Image (tube, helix red, strand yellow):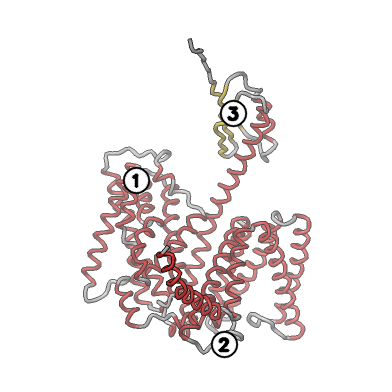
Amino acid sequence: MEVDDKADWVNPSANDRLRDQLRTMSAALSNTVAFRGFACVVAGLVVLLLPDLTTTVATVIAIALLGISGLADLVYAVFGARWFARRVNRWLAAPRGLAALALTALVTFIAVLGGGEVSLPLIIVVLGVYVGIRGLVAMIGALAKRRERNPIPRLAGGAIALVGGVLAFMVPSSLTTTVIITAAALALVVGFVLISWSLRRASRGTGLNPSTASIPDVLWDWIEGSDIGRKTRAEQASGLYFERPQRLTKLGTWWVMLVLSVAIATFAVLQDSTAVVIGAMLVAPLMTPILGLAGALVNGWSRRAFQSATLVTSGAIVSIVLAYGITAWAPVAVSFSTNSQIVSRVSPNTVDMMIALAAGAAGAFATVNSRVAAGIAGVAIAVALVPPLAVVGVSLNGGRLDDAGGAALLFLTNFVAIVLAAAAVFVITGFARPYALRNRPAQILQTVAPFVILAGIIMLPLMLTSEGLLQTQNRERDVQTTVEEWLGDDSGFEVTDVAVTGPEVSVTITGSGDAPDASDLHDAIQTDFPGPIGLTLTVVPVEVTVIPAG
């Protein structure tokens, strides 16, 4: 009882402090910027948690943006007034506007007939054609006027639009999913930054008025306020770049660790050992120059960017050659069809790029924040850099060019995704110099644009693989349902395996008794496929013997 009285005596002051903290936080978040931040967070969560609603809203937004773009071009062609984007030839704007409005009418018709989830990929195809043509026209215009102005910015923008248009036309479903998830993640990040800015404003103060400031103004103010300073930036850069006075020592150590990690990874692949592969990931040093390349791009350090890119390229080549040589002398026969370390790395898809994006962001954050630096080991495990290169060497030694190309694509995917994600994190966390971002934005965008274009090019085979896997899974699910209906509710058999490989369908059922006619199953499955199929039905009989007690 005395303890309770004492608790009652102590708690009031603690409760007062808690109320004061809550009151201070509420006051800090009682402004327009914080409300926008909460709205962004809610929007991002809604997109992730309510996919059906998101699909409908995205369809409406896509149609509206296309119509607004066409209307703006027509208004500019007639009156010379431009609402947004750069000014172009008015004779060119008129047919472009008419084409956009015609496409708007077409996609509206498609949306009404297709309805929601089915119509969105079709609309993305139409938008992809429109955006791709605009990107191509922009590139041609930039080359035609290269003597009048610097063509590089327009070439970069046109190339990005062209790549986006090709992706939208080739893989609309995968691109739609990727864009929606990326937009949701971006909304969450922007929302948290706006909320954090409001809290920082309450403690440090700022000259920006939250009532009138736009989101770009707040984001720029956040970047300037997050600047880590020249001294801290130099200390963190020393860990990313191999420079004097210990340049040769650092480089020597890096190469030794790379060779050892490649050797470990190659032996792990040959032995098909996941545990040993993880060990190779932990000691692999390739993440350092990749993060260094990202930091150099956003800071405008051309020499450091060139050195980091050269180190990554030479390291990748040496890794492949070393893995090839080890495989040539290793007394191991490699089964490319059953080796899990090879099979898991020769068919990358969009999920691999998403993993690499998250890992790159985490690696950059661990680089600039000493409190989470210990997490860099987990990042090394999450995104494999050396094992794919080892698989390339092993596959080349075995004459498996397709497998080698798939593993090389996985490494390239990880490399590009890490660079882009790390560059964004370096800007947000203050590692990028605000001076360079403010005074040389065109130069920085031009250095980052090739990686964005390369990422778009890489996304095409990744999305094709993803759509192929998704189509196979959907067909296997349909076949599973068809087989269950063919067996009936009273059957003594159950479906144990269904596999679809191109036009070939394999079904395994297990049970006792006589199975129904296989030709009926073939005819039922054929209705779910556009072309002729082959069926392999495996029936595993089960014989049950019961001996009663006594």
Q: Amino acid at mark 1?
A: Val
Does 331 appear above or below 429?
above
Q: Which quadrant, please, contains the N terminus?
A: bottom left
Q: Circle 1 — which element?
A: helix
Q: Is residue 378 above or below residue 449?
A: above
Q: Residue at x 62, y 41 (%)?
A: 475
Image point (57%, 61%), residue name: 181
Q: Secondary structure at mark 2?
A: loop
Residue 311 at x, y percent in the picture: 32, 66
**Are there few (<14), some (14-19), or many (20+) residues within 10 Å of tag 2?**
few
For marks 1 and 2, the one nearer the N-term is: 2
Q: Which mark is residue 269?
A: 1
Rendered position, 41 above or below 399: below
> What is the residue that sits farthest to the front in this orientation?
1
Picture coordinates of residue 360, whole percent (x, y):
43, 64
Amino acid identity at mark 3: Glu
